[in-house]
Image: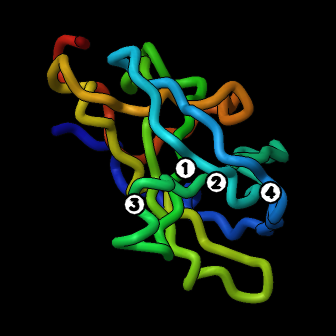
Amino acid sequence: MRFFAPNEHYKVVATFTTTPDAKAFDMPTHSGKTKKFRQYGALHFKINDTAVQLSVYQNLSLLKDDEEHLFVPFTDATSYIETYAGGRYIDLSIKDIKSNKITIDFNKCYNPYCAFADGYNCPIPPVENRLFVAIHAGEQLFGKEH
């Protein structure tokens, strides 16, 4: 695995807003299947002097085992070039939201299993989670894409 050099610039504090009335939906995966998710809220922050927003989700099939887990799939301006074309992921926890703020450390973002092998059901980042800024943090592209 290859990673960008850790950089504190990509550790940001986001304002969190909830989406309490969000309905469950089918998020497509790279294999053509879908997984049930619910938008839990939105993260608002600045990166590279640009205001951005990312939606944060709960995987409904994981709620029984980990109701605190939040999932942030995204693509950015490094996708297809320096990072996996299918996007990268960040895991967060509800318990880390304090006074509607949460720290996002992009140094911890990672590639889905689909970046390494075919046959996995990796969620495709929704359109609203496509960032037009470059996130030079976290896991980089690994060899040949699948």
Q: Is residue 131 left or right of residue 123?
A: right
Residue highlighted by disc 3: 62
Q: Which mark is residue 88?
A: none
| Of the two numbered discs 3 and 1 in the rendering, the one whose residue sits closer to the viewer | 3
Relative to the observer, which residue lies in front, 54 or 65? 65
Please tell me whether mark 3 sits on a helix, a strand or a loop.
helix
Q: Residues within 10 Å of mark 4 (few under 14, many from 20)?
A: some
How far apart in space, not on screen, are marks 2 and 4 (Cα)? 11 Å
- Upstream in the sequence, badge 1 or badge 4? 4
How far across and how far down the image is residue 24, in percent? 66, 46
Determine the image quadrant of residue 108. Answer: bottom left
Give the residue at x 60% y 53%: 57
Specify how the rendered protein is coloured.
Answer: rainbow
Give the residue at x 56% y 84%: 95
Q: Residues within 10 Å of mark 1 (few under 14, many from 20)?
A: many
Residue highlighted by disc 2: 56
| Of the two numbered discs 2 and 4 in the rendering, the one whose residue sits closer to the viewer | 2
How far apart in space, not on screen, are marks 1 and 4 (Cα)? 13 Å
Determine the image quadrant of residue 125. Answer: top right
How far apart in space, not on screen, are marks 3 and 1 (Cα)? 14 Å
How far apart in space, not on screen, are marks 3 and 2 (Cα)? 15 Å
Please tell me whether mark 4 sits on a helix, a strand or a loop.
strand
Residue highlighted by disc 1: 72
Q: Amino acid at mark 3?
A: Leu
- Upstream in the sequence, badge 2 or badge 4? 4
Residue highlighted by disc 4: 44
- Upstream in the sequence, badge 4 or badge 3? 4
Is 6 above or below relative to 85? below
